[in-house]
Amino acid sequence: MMTVMMGRLCFAHKTALAPMVRVGTLPMRLLALDYGADIVYCEVRMDIYTHTCHISVHLNTVDFVAPDERVMFRTCSKEKGRVVFQMGTADPERALVVAKLVENDVAAVDVNMGCPKEYSTKGGMGSALLSDPEKIEAILSTLVNGISKPVTCKIRILSTLEDTVNLVKRIEKTGVAAIAVHGRMKEERPRHPVHCDYIQAVAESVSIPVIANGGSSDIVKTFEDIEKFRAAAGASSVMLARAAMWNPSIFRQQGALSVEEVMEDYIRYVISLLCMSVFCMSVLCSEVFGMTDFYNKTKAELEARKAALQTNGDQ
Ligand code: FNR
């Protein structure tokens, strides 16, 4: 039992990159980890698009590819053990199919219960789940019992403190490993102040780690502010979205880098991740950004690894 538990991702006392559509791509997640984030969430992926994916293993990435050939989720060994796959779902059985598909390549599976956009809510997903606790319980229990990795969820707060606390107590009983709380109601927009008092009340009412979210711009502008937000919300962990989108080096203890330096690091990841699969895009990037030497070196290293793998495979 001990050995099984030791390998599981623990969500206490962590700093995480939040799930962000179109932002939380693999290069962004790797950058966040390099700069100091402990955990990175992928952008939300709808179960209807991911449950029919096939897995395509490359030299440096593992791709989950939809029947129409779109890559729905791309990961690599460097983030294994620290990447959380977030899904949008309103269907316990389909959620389980997706979770089983990804479970060997991710550290945990998260269910989105906060997205207020119509494309989520009209299918009963995202923040629509907040008014359907039975459905929440069915999805989370099915996942907790059906996969070997930790299951978490990310919620928004409800309109009263009492309702919010009652909901998280029900969620805790499903056996989830942690709960991320975006301290805004589903009607509220990012310009509205984050309700740290709600997050604090949640943290005091459950014994699993609570991950405070919603502090970018109000509270978190520098690395030091992460600790201030954690304290103000009385939470174990903190999750950052916009502050990290503006500059992912906010996770750096030594201080943020310039946007130009971050961009260069980002392009390096794009080149090295694509150079064995999306050849022309990678060459183009390296030429445009003056990184042809880096491209040639990375490509040579990967070719050598490929040759070594083939030789070992032949024996
Ligand atoms: C988001 N957010 C979000 N939330 C989620 O659960 N899944 C997602 O895929 C996304 N996508 C997304 C994209 C972009 C561009 C932004 C800015 C936000 C919400 C996000 O994770 C977070 O809850 C809020 O932004 C509040 O946290 P911050 O920004 O105050 O740290």
Image (cartoon, grey):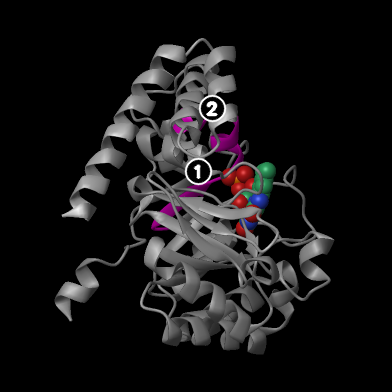
Q: Is residue 143 above or below residue 253?
A: below
Residue found at the far front of this picture:
314
**Image position of 299 (left or right of 264):** left
Left or right of residue 98: residue 132: right
Front residue of 148 and 49: 49
Q: Amino acid at mark 2?
A: Ser
Q: How far across and down, in percent of the image, does residue 29 sit?
A: 47, 42
Quarter of the image for residue 252 reads: top left
The N terminus lies in which quarter of the figure?
Answer: bottom left
Residue sitting at x 49%, y 81%:
143
Choose the circle earlier in sequence order: 2 or 1: 1
Name the element at disc 1: helix
Q: Is mark 2 within 8 Å of ligand 1?
A: no
How far across and how far down the image is residue 113, in percent?
65, 68
Residue at 49% x, 19% y is 264
Other-residue count near label 1 (Cα within 10 Å), few / some / many at <14 / 14–19 / ≥20: many
Q: From the viewer's perspective, is 195 left or right of 230?
A: right
Residue 232 visible in the snapshot: no
Q: Residue at x 34, y 20 (%)?
A: 297
In the image, which disc is placed on residue 26? 1
Region rendered in magenta: 235-250
Q: Which mark is residue 36?
A: none
Which residue in the protein does label 2 denote?
Answer: 282
